[in-house]
């Protein structure tokens, strides 16, 4: 019973396509999966692969659009950010009874999810998809956020039993630059190209 937290499940980008592949593998193995996400993107994308009796999707009830990543005329490319787990969301998570929580983005909601997992003694693991701190160097006036975000993310990864990265290069980068190997077990989770699609 795996709870996967991803910020933007209905925005069909590389991260979400990877998460959806993980979700399909969990279901194919006969297990249960619950996706916890914001109302980002096009809600029609929620059940692209059809509905499944072992799958549920829970939308955060307190997320807000990210101003510079929101276009009401193009919901497919609109992102939201959550801030906490409301009582109602915690009840829905408890009803699902996760045996593992999978984190895909270390944001504000993730902090609350980590606390929830610690209180309930649920193991935490994560997959590393985007080098968000490094992105700050590419936006005028935001370079100062790079080290703050890196420290914020490192703090959250400290609570994971394992963090899987896509390549040996990223493993080395996180080890050399942020000493991530000192706060969690880093593993390489290779990805490949689906030749059938």
Image (cartoon, helix red, strand yellow):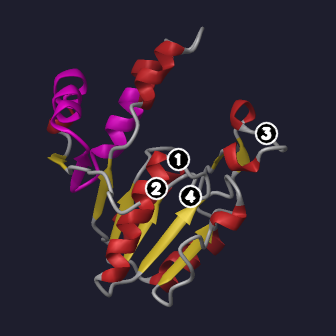
Rendered location of residue 80, percent (x, y):
67, 47
Name the residue carrying label 2: 17
Quadrant (top left/top right/bottom left/bottom right) for the N terminus: bottom left
Magenta span: chief secondary structure = helix
Give the CA separation, mark 2 to mark 3.
21 Å
Asked whether the beta carbons under mark 2 and mark 1 sit within 8 Å of each other, the answer is yes
Name the residue carrying label 1: 13
Give the CA separation, mark 4 to mark 3.
17 Å
Q: Residue at x 51, y 86 (%)?
A: 52
Q: Residue at x 69, y 35 (%)?
A: 69
Q: Residues within 10 Å of mark 1 (few under 14, many from 20)?
A: few
SS at circle 4 = loop
- Foreground tag (1 vs 3): 1
From this viewpoint, is residue 149 visible?
Answer: yes
Rendered location of residue 9, percent (x, y):
56, 58
Asked whether the beta carbons under mark 4 and mark 3 sit within 8 Å of each other, the answer is no
Give the CA separation, mark 1 to mark 3.
16 Å
Name the residue carrying label 4: 9
- Foreground tag (2 vs 4): 2
Instruction: State yes or no: residue 190 in magenta.
Output: no
Give the CA separation, mark 2 to mark 4.
9 Å
């Amino acid at each position: 019973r795996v709870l996967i937290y991803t910020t933007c499940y209905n925005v069909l980008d590389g991260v979400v396509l990877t998460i959806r592949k993980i979700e399909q593998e969990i279901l194919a193995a006969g297990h249960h999966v619950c996706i916890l996400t914001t109302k980002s993107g096009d809600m029609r994308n929620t059940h692209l692969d059809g509905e499944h009796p072992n799958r549920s999707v829970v939308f955060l009830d307190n997320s807000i659009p990210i101003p510079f990543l929101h276009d009401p005329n193009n919901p497919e490319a609109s992102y939201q950010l959550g801030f906490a787990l409301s009582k109602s969301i915690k009840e829905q998570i408890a009803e699902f009874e996760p045996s593992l929580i999978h984190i895909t983005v270390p944001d504000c909601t993730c902090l609350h999810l980590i606390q929830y997992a610690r209180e309930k003694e649920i193991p935490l693991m994560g997959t590393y998809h985007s080098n968000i701190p490094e992105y700050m160097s590419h936006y005028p006036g935001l370079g100062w956020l790079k080290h703050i975000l890196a420290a914020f993310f490192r703090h959250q990864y400290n609570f994971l039993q394992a963090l899987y990265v896509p390549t040996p290069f990223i493993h080395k980068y996180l080890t050399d630059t942020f000493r991530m190997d000192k706060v969690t077990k880093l593993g390489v989770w290779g990805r490949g190209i689906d030749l059938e699609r």
